[in-house]
Structure formats: structure tokens, C-alpha cells
Image: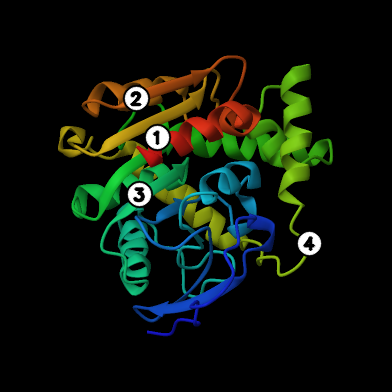
Amino acid sequence: MIRHDTLNEPVITSYAKAPSRIIRAGGVNYAYRELGPKGGIPVVFFVHLAATLDNWDPRIVDAIAKNHHVVTFDNQGVGASSGQVPDSIEAMADDAYNFIEALGFGKIDIFSFSLGGMIAQALVLKHPDLARKLVLTGTGPKGGKDMDKVVGTTYYDIIRAALTRSDPKEFLFFNRDAAGKRAAKEFLARLEERTADRDLPIKVRAFQTQLEAIKKWGRGAPADLSKITHLTLIANGDNDRMVPSVLSEDLHRRINGSELIIYPGSGHGGIFQFHDKFAPVAAEFLAR
């Protein structure tokens, strides 16, 4: 195991300034960043389809890192992490477990978005004692209705974005009304606040393999979510075209005691459009 020394460093609470690090586990070099005060239960962030370390909204990360030890990471084959992207969500969860174990964390909280939420579900079903709390946003359960349509929607919006020389996230994450377009521009600007030590972009083949894994997850036999007994916060927009909003409601019904927030007038990126409302709620949930 290789880990850069993190002792006696000043506490960083700005994601734009969090140093990038490498840790080796299971033959893979995992790229990660950490910030916030050490001690207590760390919050590990599980990122979305096609995303790297640079795709987390700093308004959400910073709000949680104010009082929590936060870790973001690239799973195997993504961004600056070595290796190849696995072709199943369960294998991605195994990689995440290797990474978390290498950091020496015996108990974590999980903050996840989209694909990251699928990986989080697979991880806690296999290792229920690893997690204390779950934040599942813009995501859905294995075998969920229309989950396998994520692939077609993604490719369609990539083409739409290319024709207008836009970022695909403007179409995939946000409604195409005035409020959605404004939120999209503001979100993309926040992702550019970090100017130094940026991550490597995801490779096309890695992205395609992630999509194949999501399709397989969507067509798989439903998991028994009654086994998830962790305190769980679920959030989404009311018009999620990527992972249909009804799947957030499905998760809420099937995870006993879970809390659900649906933001009106927003899509897949509802938590980013309403970051000013969501970030303090998520921080409070994790602090309880």
C-alpha cells in the first residue's frame, strides 16, 4: 500500500484546493482527493457516469467538508486511476471496497450520484457493516423500470449537444427551460473553478463500458433492498430523463425509513440546480 503522508497538513475545506493523491490497492493506482477535518466518520463520494474527480459540484463538497472528512476518488480505469473499467456495477463496487480498505477506513458515510448510487447500493449489500449512512441522488435500483434506457438517452443527448457545441450535461442534467439553462451554465462554471492539478478526462472506451454496466444493472434481477438498514437520504429532480424520477420513489419505498427529497422544475442534476437548498440538508443529515 502506498499513501502520501497527510499528517500535520493544514485543514483544507475548499475542493478547488484539495490536493490530488494516489493510493495503490489490488494492483490499481487510485486517484483521489481529500479535504475537511480529520476524525469522525469520513464521507466517501461516488461519482457519476463519465465523471472524474473534477465533476463534483464544489458547492456541495465544500458544504460537507466544512465539518466532515471528505474523500472523492476515481474508480478503476477512470480519470487518473489505472486499470480497466469493469463491465458490471458489482465489480465496480468491489474496486471501491479495495480503495476504501486501502485508506484504512473501517466505517464510512457514502454520498453518491447517478452511477455512483448504483455502485453504493451494490457495495452496502455486500458489505453492510462498512457504511453508516447513505446519500443516494439521481439514481435507481437494480432492475428498476426503464433503467436500461439510460444508454439511449445518453447517446441521444450527446448528439444534441454536439450539434449545438454544448456540454452534454446541459441536456442530460438540466431541463431545457430558462431556469434549467441558467442552472446548467452556472454548474459548468463551478466545475471550472479548480484551475491547477486537474484530473485526466475519461477515455471513450471506459465511458462505453460504464454504459454497458448500467444497461446490465437495469436488466438484472431486482436486489432485496430491505437488507439496506442504513439511514438513507434520497434526492432527485422531478423530471430526471436519465434515471427516471420514479426510481427515486421506488428506492424510498423499498429502503425502510429512508428520506426522500424531490426538487420541482429540475432534472437529473436537481441537487446541483438546487445546491443552495440541498447542500445544507445533506450536511445536516450526515451530522446527525
The mark that comes first in sequence, 4 or 3, is 3
Dot 2 lies on which element? strand
Q: Which labelled disc corresponds to residue 43? A: none
Residue 277 is situated, as x and y percent measured from the top left of the image, at 58, 26
The mark that comes first in sequence, 4 or 1, is 4
Closer mark to the observer between disc 3 and disc 1: 1
Closer mark to the observer between disc 1 and disc 2: 1
Residue 103 is situated, as x and y percent measured from the top left of the image, at 37, 71
Dot 3 lies on which element? strand
- Amino acid type, mark 2: Glu
The mark that comes first in sequence, 2 or 4, is 4
Q: Which labelled disc corresponds to residue 195? A: 4
Which residue appears at 48% of the width and 30% of the height? 281
Q: Is residue 225 above or below residue 127?
A: above
- Amino acid type, mark 3: Asp
Q: Is residue 2 left or right of residue 276?
A: left
Determine crowd level at label 1: few under 14, some 14-19, many 20+ residues with C-alpha closer than 10 A: some
The quarter of the displayed image where residue 9 is located? bottom right
Q: Which residue is mark 1?
A: 285
Q: Which residue is mark 3?
A: 109
Q: Look at the image and tell me whether residue 242 can be seen.
A: no
Q: Which residue is mark 2?
A: 259
- In space, the residues marked 4 and 3 are separated at their CA atoms by 28 Å
The mark that comes first in sequence, 3 or 2, is 3
Mark 2–mark 4 contact, CB under 8 Å?
Answer: no
Nearer-the-camera pick, 230 or 216: 230
Mark 1–mark 2 contact, CB under 8 Å?
Answer: yes
Q: Is residue 80 left or right of residue 23?
A: right
